Structure formats: structure tokens, C-alpha cells
Amino acid sequence: MLQIDLWKRILIWTTVAVGLFLALPNLFYPRVEQHNDAVAAIELQGETPALLAERDGWPSYLPSGLVNLGLDLRGGAHLLAEVQVEDVYAARLKALWPEVRDVLRDARDTVGTIRLQPSQGDSLRVRISRPEGMQRALELVRGLAQPTASVTGAMSNDLEVTADGSDIVVTLSEAERAATDRRTMMQSLEIIRRRIDEVGTREPTIQRQGADRILIQVPGIGSAAELKEIIGTTAQLTFQPVVGRTDDPGASAGVGNEVLPSLDEPNTYYILEQAPVVTGEELVDAQPAFDQNGRPAVNFRFNPAGARKFGDYTAANIGNPFAIVLDGEVISAPVIQSHIPGGSGIITGRFTVEESTQLAVLLRAGALPAGLEFLEERTIGPELGQDSIDAGKIATIVAFAGVLIFMALSYGLFGLFANVALIINVALVFGLLSLIGATLTLPGIAGIVLTVGMAVDANVLIFERIREELKTARGPARATELGYEKALSAILDANITTFITAVILFVMGSGPVRGFAITLGLGILTSVFTAIFVTRLLIVMWFERRRPKTIEV
């Protein structure tokens, strides 16, 4: 006998109601999107009348989760960047010079005087005046090597130290270079992601491609140039000792020094020691603020290691200038007035409020460990995205209408029940996409169109089984019950294998392939639910109301 317990009916209709409730905001996409943007802006900037009006444009008691539109639907910017990992080798070896100098200085009686020589970017070259002490010098410098921090580089050191006449040549080992490349790519991915998240963009795609490239796609952003401004600034902050000042940009700085321009003082250049005392990597926080004169500035705070080095240097160099360098420009060179413990300070300069806020964002997100070279950049206009949406709508409507008409003509009243379940099925797909915050792309729309076609497969199997059972002269209720029972195994087999395919596409694929896999997988789950439970419940309710003696399927 066709029967469904009351608690099962309540559970089925509750599931349907929740799915429709979650999908509801997508019918009012612009209003809900404006509401969500206003809520995020209020959290960052505080309440303003305009933001409050936008926030109140959508009731707070209704869900506000939306299906995010991908780059091909919303428009936005696409970048392919190559990470200059060689920059990290040079910076690493440049920072090693003070340690080499100090360890050799303790053995000056054996190695003589120590001079830094011009070096290639991937090596550090130091000359000693007593070649007979070379063996001792090599031992001392090799003592600075550390084990390579990687599984593949186990049992190897990070430095290779060799002799070339009177010169000691220090390079990174192959194992250390490979480990450095991996770290650099991971840091670059994370920092780019943080910088983009800081400006509130929706559902960016940031993923590694190949050995040293990063793909960046950000929907809703104005242009590729705007995106490059956000992520292309390295925001490398260093604190370097000042050797002198000059007005000649071509002045000789000496080995181990460099000449950098002043940001605030035109035609002024500072001669600085290349090896920084502290770097931006040791920053743990940076916030926009104002100095004692009410001008925009940036407060910063170091981690314990950076705080210790900063405090020790300021204690030992009271009365000397100390340069704060950002991306190759001296933004400030204050004189150290007293010991600065605690590892906190303030960066002042000719900033606007907007510039100080942007600098704080970049410093807080962290410095890119290496420069980026943009190999490919593309801006997709919102008009093209709208065209894609319109084309996807037409494809979905045509497929939807075709399936509805076919089911109604083929199975009559039962086909109409299947059509109701199909409409609910599509709504449930959008409800689930909204719930998990998924991004819908053109391939995702293709997955929904495919789901529309597949959603009726289960109903077709059930209805054909009911037809077969009616031929054996069983009553309509018993034929319907057996039709559902005997079709269940075939339905599960077909959908489980397709779902496994969707999972493999999601795990192994990337970008558009994943978008297709998500909508296909969710569509399979909702179509099985609507075919087995929703359609059956509709038929049972009709049976209870009409009590038919015969049925036409």
C-alpha cells in the first residue's frame, strides 16, 4: 500500500522549504548584493547614512547568501604572473654578509683583512688578505650552514662554500634552492590572497601554475591595471643603517652599500648599508594612525625576534640616523634619540590618509618574497559577462522547457508531478550553491543544464516500471509502489557512478572544470532526492485525495 509516515512527510517538505528559502536571495540579486557590500563596508568603515540605507534594502531576517558569479559571468581581471625566485637567492646571500664578516673577524690573525667583493646575484664573494688562512676561513664560514628544511633535502646543508684564489665564494645548495623555490611560491600565493581579500573582492581564483607561475582571476574588479596595483606592489620594508647623504644619484656607495632616493626630499639620496637590521618580514601588525602633528602615519609592531634586534640596534646607535626603506625609497631617516624597546614604532612621511591606509594594508599582508613579472593580463568587461549570463539563461530555459513538455506529453499527470519536482530540484541546486558560497561559471551553467536533463532520468525509470507492473493486472497503488521499489537500485547505480565522476573532476581538475563538477555533483544529489521522495510524496497525496481505480502513465 502506498503510504508515507507523517514524520517523513514533514522532513521532506521541511528540506524543500529550507532549500527554497536559501535560494530566494538569488531572485533579488542586485538588492542582496548591495546589502552584503554595505554590511562589509560598515564593519570596516563604520556606519554612514548611505551605507545604512543600502543595508536596509534587504530584510535582515531573510538569508543573504548568493551564488557568486565567476569571472566569465561578472567580468573582471585575469593575470598570469611569474615569480622571480632568483631575487630570493640574492636577498638571502646579501643578508648573510654580516654573519660572514663577524665570524671571519674573530680569526683576523689567521685570515687577515676581510673585504666584500662585487658578486653575482646568486653568490657572495669575500676576499681575505692571507690566502694561507683559506682553509681556516672555509671552516668558519661552513660553520654557518644549516640543514636544509625540506624532506627531499634531508642530510644536506643550505650553503656551499668554496675557494677561488683569495676569495671565499658562498652559494646556496641545490637542495636549498629547491626548498626556497617551494617556500617562495607558497608565500607568494598566501600574500597575494591576503592582499586581494583585504580589499573585499568576491571569490578570487588564485592558484599555482607550473613551477614558478601564479594564475590570478578576480571577478568584479575594474581592470587588470587596478589588480596589478593591489598585488604588484612588493611593500618590502627594511630598516637600514645610514652611511651618508648626497645629491648625486651616481655617487660611489662602496662595496656593501647602496644609494637610494629619498621619498620626501627631492634630489636627496642616502648611502645605506645593504644588509638591513630588521625587515618587514618580522612585522606582526601595521595600522594607519596620526603622528604628534596630526599628519597621517603608520604604526607598526615587530615580532619578538625583530623587536630584540630593533631594540639592540637603537640602544647601540643613539644619535645616528636610521633609514626606513620601502620598495627602494627612503621614506624616513630619523635620528635615534633613545633606546626603543618593545619593538613598536611609527612611520611618518608625506602621506595622505588613503596612502597611509593602503601602506598599512600592504605591510599587514606581508611583503612579497620576490618580484612578479606579469606575462599575461586580460580585462573582461561586465558587458561580456552579461552576454554570457543571457546566453546561459537562454540555454537553461530552452532545456527546461523541452524537458517539461516531453514529460507532460509522455506521462500525463505523473509527468506533471515530475515537472514540479524538477522545478524544486533546480531551486535546491541554487540553494545549496548559495549555502556553500560556490562560484557559478559558464561551465557551471552547463552542469545545471545537464542536471536538468538528468533529473528526469530517475522519474522515467520509475514510470516505466509502473507501466510494466500495470500490465500484470495489479492495482494502481500496488503497481506504483512496486515501480518505486524495483527502479531504486538502477537509479542509485546510475547516479552514484556519475557522482564519482563529478568528485574525480573536482579533485583532479581546476578552475572551470571544478565549477562544472560542483554543479553536476550537487545536481545529482538534489535530483535523486526529488525523484525518490518529492515526486513519490506528490503521487501519494494525489492517491489519498482521488482514490483512483485505474491510472494512465
Image (cartoon, helix red, strand yellow):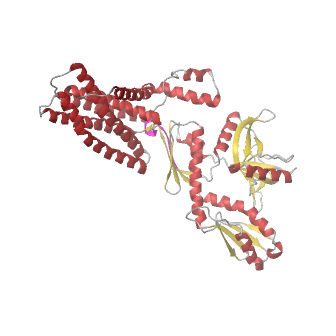
> Is 224 above or below relative to 58?
below
Q: In this picture, which residue range is highlighted in magenta?
A: 70-80
Q: Tell me which corner region of the image, top left, top right, bottom left or bottom right, holds residue 294.
A: top right
| Magenta-drawn stretch contains 79 | yes
As drawn, which residue projects farthest toward the bottom?
A: 132
State the quadrant of the C terminus. top left
> Is 339 above or below relative to 453?
below
x and y, in percent, of residue 443 in the image: 38, 41
User: Position of 443 compared to 109: left or right?
Assistant: left
Q: Which residue appears at 67% of the width and 58% of the height?
A: 91
x and y, in percent, of residue 22 in the image: 44, 29
x and y, in percent, of residue 551 in the image: 16, 26
Front residue (pair 68, 321): 68
Q: Which residue appears at 77% of the width and 77% of the height?
A: 133
x and y, in percent, of residue 219 in the image: 49, 38
User: Position of 264 compared to 457: left or right?
Assistant: right
